[in-house]
Image (cartoon, helix red, strand yellow):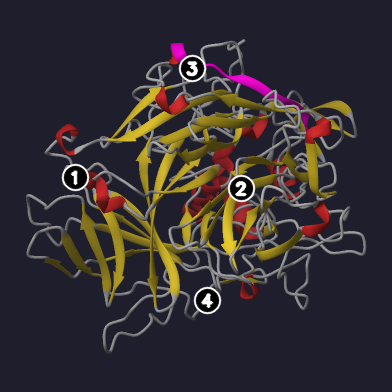
Amino acid sequence: MRSRAFLPLLLTGGALADSLHPLVTLEDIYPSNEVELKVSAMAFRGDDLFVTVFSPNRQDKAPFLKGEIFRIPEITTKKDRSGIKAERVMGDLYEPTAIAVHNGKIYVGEKDKISRLEDRNGDGKYDASEKVILIDGISQPNFHTYTVGFGVVEKDGKNYLAGNLTTSIKLGGSRAFNVTVNPKTHRGSTFMLGPITGEEKPEDTDISYVAGGYRTPNGFGVGADGAMIVVDNQGVFNPSNEFIRITPGGFYGHFLMQRDDSNIAAFQPKEADSVKGGSKYQSPPTVHMPQGAVARSPSQPVLLKDLPEAVAAYEGQYLVGDVTMGRVSRVFTEEVDGIWQGAVFKHSGGHDAKGVTGFTAGPNRIVQGPDKRFYIGHIGAGGLWEFLGEPKKPWWGLQRMTFKSADQIDPKFNEIVAVRDVPGGLELEFFRPLDRVIAVELPEVEQWTYVPTNGYGGRPFGKEALAVKAVTHSGDMRRVRLSIPGIRDNSPPFIKQKGYSNENVGWVVHLKLPKQGLYADEAWYTSVRHQREQGETVLPTVANADSDPKEVAEGIFSSICAACHSTDGSRIVGPSLKGILGRTQKVIRDGKPVDVTVDEAYLHRALTDPLHEYPEGYAPAMPALNLPDKDRKALVDWMKGL
């Protein structure tokens, strides 16, 4: 049953890391009996792991492929796969993507409802008669609507289920109306349902909202201080992937279109045009996770806590999985003048069918077990759920990650642990003291911003190099302060583009320390609030706002197009761009095949109205980019050279 695999997919550049992080070990703990666990959520009850599974599809009509719950008994005590078995305890679920255990009871979130399970006959399994539905009708049938979570959070001495509701979209990525089924529903939002006790009745529970303005919030976590963490995916109004530490009442920029029979996101400003939107109404993200460079389909954030003393420097940071990149990133956060922001690092990659030196597939959920180790569940499917990499990968998997003890760590290992904003620059913290002084000319620093629009994704804007003017080392050589004049933040002047701007977006400061022998030698720091030295002023203009057309085109390709199109002739989700000009191609137009020659006019049509006609043999999935005429021309001219 484990023979199904993906089409071979390629990525350009350094999008895939090649190695397992030196501070961790991996084990393949996939059950040895014949099951397919496409992991959509996980939760522990004692040493038993409960896993929800389903098969993602791209249809908007029921019946969907049926979801299930499996129990893996005493998995924390098992040392190898031979003793690990999965037992099916429930079926006939409607795409479950959330599960929690509270007071011994199991809570499950399906596409359209949230329920508590009651094992009334004591057989350890559940059927429809043992489901207590706490809220129903929270979604119309749409392939993109999920209930993501759960986290159990406390408020006023009571416990609640918290999680995210993703939004309805059209095939291709553009927005669809979120038709109201239950008027209490606000999709694209973080909710709290409860209070929960393990014995609550539907009439005793209610749903409330903490924040809104997301598109595909496929990750939900809880921080050490009870803060709620959401990870959202690139798309319409999302020019990058985003790690968000929620500010209660925050609206994070993804507008849902409004009409009488549809619901909008929680805290979506009523005075804004729901079709056009605009970043001036949004709360800034905490950390940008640039598309392609760091993330492509980020998923579960998990707090690093109760770490061994040898790796205590990472306590309070987060790991974030990524389904299609098949990797895990690390996120550091800090508070600057009341604003939360931080940095993202590449943490672990590598692909290993045996699950020891890399991941077996795409990490979708990460949870910490009662044994303090981290359990990683994988998922996959066709289309944009595909795990990008070679060789072919299965669409399921389960691994265990353990941080090493002091005697297991290579004494030469070092990396950047944290990046902090300081007056006039940035401060870097390292895992252990540096064995050499960093020279001024070594750090490579650049910055850019994004302009969220109602088109899909977005390219970097205002990219400019920054010069390090001075380097100061701490006495113990574990911290280095870089003086970097010109770091920007959410301050004017703002970049304006076709009625949109980068207000409330912040800037990404990309820093790299080559030739230092570091594992993580680069970081992407999000500057929303930058501390300036006395007398330092904001730069009056934005350099390179009107970039070279080739740079514009390459930026659009790497941040938007590369997810679906290669430049080397290989097939991904869409056709390769290599040699595209002059190619004879059969397209589907008005439901009928038509032969066309790809010329400049065709390319402009494809970028302007991608679903008017699409290549035969490919799904009609190209999103509307809404590119300005100048940017579209730059991209077409660039493609002509391929």
Q: Position of residue 153 (x, y in %)?
A: 57, 58
- Name the residue carrying label 4: 494
| Tag 4: amino acid | Phe
Please name which of the two marks, 1 or 2, marks the residue nearer to the observer. Answer: 2
Looking at marks 3 and 4 on the same chain, the residue that comes earlier in the sequence is marked by 3
Q: Position of residue 589 (x, y in %)?
A: 86, 33
List the single residue furthest toward the right. Answer: 260
| Tag 3: amino acid | Ile
What is the distance, in whole Å, between disc 1 and disc 2 at their CAs?
A: 35 Å
List the single residue furthest toward the front. Answer: 121
Please name which of the two marks, 2 or 4, marks the residue nearer to the observer. Answer: 2
What is the distance, in whole Å, between disc 4 and disc 1 at their CAs?
A: 38 Å
Looking at marks 1 and 2 on the same chain, the residue that comes earlier in the sequence is marked by 2
Looking at marks 2 and 3 on the same chain, the residue that comes earlier in the sequence is marked by 3
Q: Position of residue 171 (x, y in %)?
A: 77, 40
Looking at marks 1 and 3 on the same chain, the residue that comes earlier in the sequence is marked by 3
What is the magenta range? 82-93
Label 2: how many residues lie within 10 Å, few (<14), some (14-19) or many (20+)? Answer: many
Asked if residue 526 can be seen in this view, the reply is no
